[in-house]
Structures are given as structure tokens and as C-alpha cells.
Amino acid sequence: MQTKKFSTVHLNNLTIDDLYSLNNSTIAYAAPVRKSIGELPKLALAQLETNNTAMGVQMNKSSKSALTAKLAEMDADCDDRFAEIKRNIITAVKGRDAEKRAAGEKLEILLSPYWDNNTKAMNTQIGVFNELFGKYNTNAQLKAQAVTIGISDMMAGLETANSAFEALYKTRNEEGAAVEGPSASSLKRASVQSY
């Protein structure tokens, strides 16, 4: 006879993904013996399946969106455009031309609070770029300095790309919000109790 040893599992400490996987494994292991177990275990297993399926449907709504791949592509485009602007500013600051160096230093001061914006979450990045362009577009001197070092078209391109990125981001969020039902995290408790 083979002896099995059981361990305590604290389900509340599991992530939603891990809980979902554990429940799926349990359901798969129980499937072959479903007919031979009693009525009460059958009901408990059915409840676990119901709760786990409901949680699975709501998991990662935004990543299942058809817009997610396009959104990631647009995010990478904005990051690349911003990196190009920063490279040109750094080149101007380190260059020999005094006029370009002075213009680059002023633009570097403008961009210093935003320098790592490309590493932020999408919604934060969009908002921070909007703030940056709010300052840039209202200051004629900054625009003239951008022309001096040759990045005015790059700035306009980034602003346009950021606006399109924002519109798509909002569309995807509205699409995700339109999916009926509670969030997966709100269904976690029922799934834990079913286990």
C-alpha cells in the first residue's frame, strides 16, 4: 500500500493565476473518480468548477483584448521616439557648437523630470507626456531651442504618437470595462472557499 503525505496550502496567499492553476489541476485529478465519490464531494467539485470557471473568464480581460498587441506596439514606438529625442539633446549638450549646446542644456532641463518616462506604466506615461507637451507648446523659447538642435519635428511626432496611443489605451479600457461581471480578484474568495 502506498502512503500519501499531505501539506497545508494557504490559498489566500496564492496569486489569482496560481489559484486558478491549482483549481484546474485539482479538477483534472478528480475527474476520473467523479462517478465513484459521494454526492457531497460531487457537489463540492461542481461548485469548485463553477467558481474557477467564473474566475478564469474574468482573468486578464485587458490582455485578451485584440487591441493589446497594437497598444504594445504603439508604446514601443513612443519609447523609441522619446529615446531619439534624448539622444539628440545629449549630442547637442556634448557638441562643440555653443548655440546648440545652450539650446540642448535648456531642453535637458525641461526633460529632466521626464527622463525615465518610457519605463512607466502606459497610463502614467501618457499623462506625463501630456504634461510635458503642455509645457513645451506654451513656451516659444523652448520651441525655438528645439528648432536649433533639430528636434522640433521629433517632438511633434512624439506628441502625435502619444495622442494616438492615449486614444487606443482609452478604447481598450472601455472595451475591458464593458465585459460584464465582477473582476477576477473579487471572485478569488469564492474560489478559495470552494477549494
Image: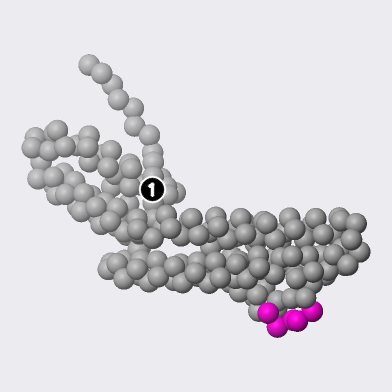
Identified at 22% across, 41% down, the residue is 27
Q: Left or right: where does residue 142 sit relative to residue 190?
A: right
The residue nearer to you, when weighing 65 against 6, is: 65
Q: Quadrant of residue 41?
A: top left
Identified at 39% across, 60% down, the residue is 67
Q: Quadrant of the N terminus?
A: top left
Tell me the kind of residue under disc 1: Asp
Q: Quadrant of residue 98?
A: bottom right
x and y percent of residue 47 in the render?
A: 19, 52
- Residue 46 in view here: yes
The residue nearer to you, when weighing 107 against 34, is: 107
In the rendered image, the vertical position of residue 3 relative to residue 173, given as above or below:
above
- Residue 62 in view here: no
> Which region is colored magenta?
137-142
The residue identified by callout 1 is 17
Identified at 55% across, 57% down, the residue is 77
Q: Left or right: where does residue 151 sit relative to residue 46?
A: right
Q: Left or right: where does residue 90 sit relative to residue 96?
A: left
The residue nearer to you, when weighing 116 against 59, is: 116
Residue extending furthest toward the top: 1
Q: Residues within 10 Å of mark 1 (few under 14, many from 20)?
A: some
Magenta stretch contains residue 141: yes
